[in-house]
Image (cartoon, rainbow, N blue to C red):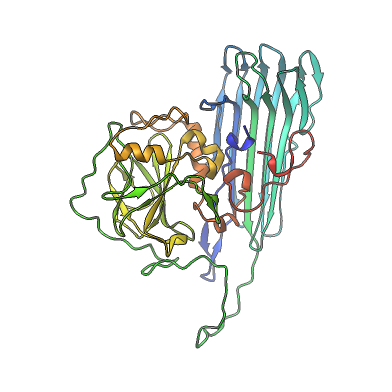
Amino acid sequence: MRLRVVLGALLLVSLFSAGSSGAVVPSPVSSASAFGVRVVVPGKTPVSAGSISAPPASAASLVGWSYGNGAVTTGAITGGANGTVDDDRAIGRGVVHVGSVSLFGGEVTADAITSKSVSRASPSSAGGDLSGSGISNLVVLGSSVTATPNAKVTLGDWGYAIALEQAVTDQNTSQRRGHRGFVVGLHVHLTAEHGGLPAGTEIFVGYAEAAATAPKAVAPPPPSSPPTSPPSNHHHHEPSPPPVGASPSTPPPVQSPPPGVRPHLTAGGYVFPIYGPASFSDDFGAARADTGWHHGNDIFAPLGAPILAVTDGTLFLVGWNTIGGNRFWLRDLQGNEFYYAHLSAFTPVARDGAQVKAGDVIGFVGATGDAAGTPTHLHFEIHPAALLGMGYDGVIDPYPYLLAWQRLDDASFDATGWTPPGKKAPPPAAILLQADDISAVSGLDPAGFEGVLTGEPLFGEGPPGPKIVYASPGFAGNDAR
């Protein structure tokens, strides 16, 4: 399993604030995350200990942790994450300390593993530091091992480990400077069954990440009179204009929900996302120019057909972007996320932070964003909480669920390891950490990634992947996931 399946990067999209001149300028942004231990078994939901993220600043402390009848045991786990912005400067700090590490009944031990990542960014420079990371008294199969960055250690005939696995991303665009760095104290890969865990299992001990980005200083353009007529042959690469009645500075169009919409729910409380006649096929994974491949299903329906919340939850990122057009995200009570795009308009309930019930009318079918000129439809995606560490690629094929919900049945989630929400309880902290990975980005808009430290391995879109340092033992260019 590639590294991106489990290393959830807490990356925030550029915020905007008004400068003294009244112009809108991007703000510095920082973030950090860390965890003590994570075990990823093929076909099962990853299990983590001591997961934290910032902002806001957070800390974790455990007296000890174990997994799998001695496969993993540790002493105390402590960690902290902090992201600060001071005027035009941003700093992210993530650190975790894991004591008394023992894997597979003592075959791999360490007195302590410390992972620390710091990233800084300002208008004039960006950089970071991973040098505070280290392993004390690492012993593998009875032999002492000196831990150096990305050192590969063979584990008999059943696997290998990477010590101080790390990578950095430096970003320098026309508008922003940024830096992101992460380090894993010890990363174990099983190539064969061992200690009761199957081949393909990965164990991460001590993960810390930090990111920071800041706008470059840009002089305001001199005032000029508008042209009397549009210039000829004018070509630009700005985002597509919003639909009639909307602009980047005003909310998307809003319409009242039609009366009499009474959708039928499944036994589990799910509802098909469109009210009335609709058709769809399993086009998940089809090639797409903007995002590489189709991350959902297109549901075709008449213009203006009501679009419904598929389950109880919270709306966020309600608004417009270049590719999705009018779009929004819905997060359910367990942290699973659903993405809707290409709406013609919203209803008044559609606002960031709104609590909705399954069947509430959020908007209406359209063809906005890059769907302009196509038959009206809803682009719909499902992002299970267990896969949010993959970023935008942490998505499953919605087709079987759409079929089931259309028939008022509940689909089985066994194939993905995603369990549908049960009782109404807040999602665990580890799921909240990973849910923010996606909620911080605009969704389906590669241009939105230029100002943040994303990298292709995190979200499957945007700038090239991270530059790898000390790469030879543990990484190989952009295939390092």
**Going by the image, does 73 lie left or right of 416?**
right
Q: Position of residue 230 (x, y in %)?
A: 51, 83
Residue 368 vs residue 8, the one in the foreground: 368
Identify the image quadrant of the C terminus: top right
Query: Which image quadrant: the N terminus?
Result: top right
- Residue 262 screen position, x and y as percent: 21, 45
Q: Is residue 186 above or below residue 193?
A: below
| Relative image position of residue 224 (x, y in whole percent) | 56, 83
Q: Residue at x 60, y 44 (%)?
A: 458
Q: Quadrant of residue 131?
A: top right
Apparent side of residue 422 relative to residue 177 in the rendered image (left or right): left
Query: Which of 247/195 is in front?
Result: 195
Seen from this angle, which residue lies furthest left? 260
Q: Residue at x 51, y 50 (%)?
A: 441
Instruction: Judge whether 209 appears above or below 369 on screen.
Output: above
Residue lying at the far bottom in this picture: please name it: 228
State whether residue 1 appears in this view.
yes
The reply, left or right, for residue 437 in relation to residue 115 is left
The answer to which of 368 and 32 lies nearer the viewer is 368
Which of the two residues, 49 or 472, is positioned nearer the viewer here? Answer: 472
Is residue 55 visible in this depiction of the protein?
no
Residue drawn at (43%, 36%) of the image: 335
Q: Residue at x 52, y 85 (%)?
A: 227
Residue 81 vertical position relative to residue 102 in the rendered view, above or below: below
